[in-house]
Amino acid sequence: MGRRSRAEEEYEVNEVEDTITGSFGSRLCLVSSELALRKSTASFSTRFTRETGVIDPGSRFCSCWEKIIFLWSIFSSFFTPLEFCFFRGLPEHLASLESAQIIFLVDVVLQFFIAYKDVHSHNMVYDRKSIAIRYAKGRLLVDLMGCMPWDAIYKVTGRREVIRYMIWIRLYRARKVAQFFKRMEKDVRINYLFTRIVKLITVELYCTHTGACIFYYLATTIPASEEGYTWIGSLTMGDYKYINFREIDFWTRYITSLYFAIITMATVVLF
């Protein structure tokens, strides 16, 4: 066989054996470099927070705080209709839950120190003045009004019913629950059908709960002499009568209202 041509030498393919050791080493190097990058970023974020007093929204503290506020937003969304509609017969241990508004007041203060991403440049803004101006122009007023002790103000101002209607402002916090489901729907790791089913059940439970509270509230707006003509005052279940329903146990009144709301909404839908 003769000498190989120059073209054959030029296009000769050299087979390189990719050993397991080399492959594992390269992956380990990649992971270690990524962890080092995350560690340096986290340390920079912590250092930046300590020096300027601004909280990075990607920090561990901010992430934990958002979860706490989310859970309390769920509680507030369900408790607000209960607090407003059962105000005239709410047990003391439930009425004391009004003190939970302190948590949302702390959140209002923290919003002045949390950095945000600019919608135009997509860069993080760490300037304290810019953060304060943005929050003040946004939802500061609504957040503050949601933290106000409206029941106490109602008693001080001569028990004006209009004052108590301001409690419904707290339902603005339900947007956090809506944002949570929106993120779940976009997450490819979670089944979309499962997310929609959970969302549907949550909405149905909330609507039924709110409807039950409103039905009870409508019965309490009637003068005491005419309460026997309301839906709950005229209700009789076996030998049990609800004539003096205000004196009945709270949970009995709530479950009865829940039952009435379910039956009413079901019959309205059917007919």
Image (cartoon, helix red, strand yellow):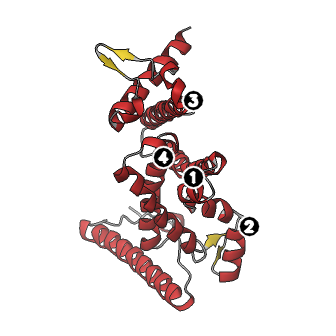
Cα–Cα span, label 1 and label 2? 19 Å
Residue drawn at x 43%, y 28% is: 257
Count the numbered circles shown.
Answer: 4
The numbered mark at residue 222 is: 3
Residue drawn at x 57%, y 88% is: 52
Residue 213 appears left or right of 35:
right
Crowding at label 2, few (<14), some or many (≥20) Cα neighbours within 10 Å? few
Crowding at label 1, few (<14), some or many (≥20) Cα neighbours within 10 Å? many
Crowding at label 4, few (<14), some or many (≥20) Cα neighbours within 10 Å? many
The label nearer to you, 4 versus 2, is: 4
The label nearer to you, 1 versus 2, is: 1
Residue at image mark 2:
137
Q: Is residue 217 above or below residue 120?
A: above
Residue at image mark 4:
83
* Residue 4 visible here: no
Amino acid identity at mark 4: Glu
Residue at image mark 1:
170
The label nearer to you, 4 versus 1, is: 4
Amino acid identity at mark 2: Lys
Residue drawn at x 55%, y 46% is: 178
Cα–Cα span, label 3 and label 2? 42 Å
